Amino acid sequence: MQLAKRLENLGTETAFAVSGAAAAWAARGNRVFPFHLGDIDLPTPANIVAAMNRAISEGKTGYCAAAGIAPLREALAANIGRDRGLSLGPENIVVQPGGKPVITKFIQTMMNPGDGVLYPNPGYPIYESQINYFGGRALPYRYHETSTGFGIDLEQLRSLAPQARLLIYNNLQNPLGCESSPAEMAEIARIAVEHDLKVLSDEAYFEMRYAGKSSSIASLPGMAERTVILYTFSKKFAMTGWRLGCAAGPEPVISQIAKLNTNDESCTTHFVQVAGVEALQHPEGAAPILAELQKRRDAAIAALQDVPGLKVARPDATFYLFPNVTGLLTRKGFNDVAELAKAALHDIGVSFCTRHHFGTRQPAETEHYIRLAYSGISCAMITEGIGRLAEWARKG
Ligand SMILES: Cc1ncc(COP(=O)(O)O)c(C=O)c1O
């Protein structure tokens, strides 16, 4: 069957293939330690579930407004505005089935074919997929390893900016777990203003932090009028499968995105939106989720100290670690992290994604990395799994 030509440019999340390989290995009777899952294995807070059930029994099961129900838009405007120091009204909010649709709708709204789009690499793979699918020019920007994590190569970003019309920025980053210093964020904002770049600020992990305070690039001078924020309920409230999020930004962009909603899905599920209002008004249930993730982070960092050939930073946000495993590769005699990942699954049942799942390796890269997610694995399994990894590494 002949399919549309443009599909040749559509990418995917190749990380899902890792889940498939881990499931197949487990189905053969093996124990698997799932460090590949970006999903959360904790329940959605009970008050949110109860609000959804109430909404269904009250008959909130039909179509609703394409841009989202008024109480949710109002609650999101108040919440996102308060946490970021922005002045937002409901006209600045368009509800989405998850955070991910904001990526495609921002690109469809702001990008013409041939336009250059800066985006992080390593980074969330859907950026590159959507830029290519809609005929943009992908301009990946890189990170360098620092003593405390990773920083954006600002020199490279600045040198690419004249070719770009859009900038995608993911602070509290997947897969790196890193965050910008205030100086780094200020410099990125300056570059955006100087080159008149329109910005997608992917803030999926804004609330997933264990110390310090998040801030948004949208709150810096000259940025609010050029920035669309990606907001999601998925992580904070362990609601990944509910599909609820929004785009927050300038009204002319937001109203066009609402028109895309009408074309794409008509509206986000009504009773899910009602539950979203409950989540924002009574967010107490989110605290135990964050507390558990922090314990897991600490367990993972402690155990990783014993793995020879591996270096890891201790991020204060997200639920990802991105260790440098260049030394481990040498010890085990592998040339590539893909070989390491395959052998780790089959030898010790430890499953993880690698750098390859987060964009094409850039020419200047010499080091090798894997991503360990601790959102879908208990503390006990983290300690045991990484313990196995350490023993395996020691054997050489
Ligand atoms: C950086 C980033 N942006 C966006 C998303 C999409 O989130 P959602 O599940 O709400 O669509 C994810 C999900 O993992 C992510 O890591």
Image: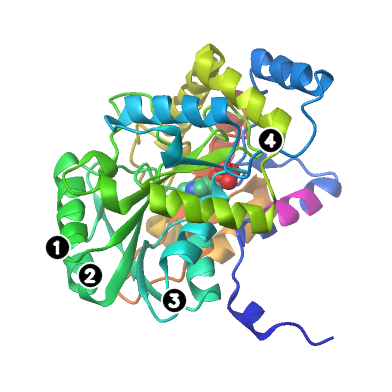
Q: Could you say which disc has been placed on residue 161 in the image?
A: 2
Callout in the foreground (1, 4): 1
Q: Which residue is mark 1?
A: 194
Question: Residue at position x 69%, y 30% from top?
Answer: 272
Cα distance, mark 3 to mark 4?
Answer: 30 Å
Q: Dot 4, crowdedness within 10 Å: few (<14), some or many (≥20)?
A: some
Left or right: 229, with 293 as reference point: left
Q: Could you say which disc has been placed on residue 136 in the image?
A: 3
Mark 2 or mark 1, earlier in chain? 2
User: Does label 4 point to a residue whose CB lies under 8 Å from ligand 1?
Assistant: no
Q: Dot 3, crowdedness within 10 Å: few (<14), some or many (≥20)?
A: many
Mark 3 or mark 1, earlier in chain? 3
Cα distance, mark 2 to mark 1?
Answer: 9 Å
Circles 1 and 4 in contact, beta carbons < 8 Å: no
Q: Quadrant of residue 164?
A: bottom left
The magenta stretch is 18-24
Circles 2 and 1 in contact, beta carbons < 8 Å: yes
Q: Amino acid at mark 2?
A: Ala
Cα distance, mark 4 to mark 2?
Answer: 37 Å
Circles 2 and 3 in contact, beta carbons < 8 Å: no
**Residue 288 lies in magenta, yes or no?**
no
Under circle 2, the secondary element is helix
Callout in the foreground (2, 1): 1
Percent of width and height locating residue 259: 57, 55
Q: Could you say which disc has been placed on residue 242 in the image?
A: 4
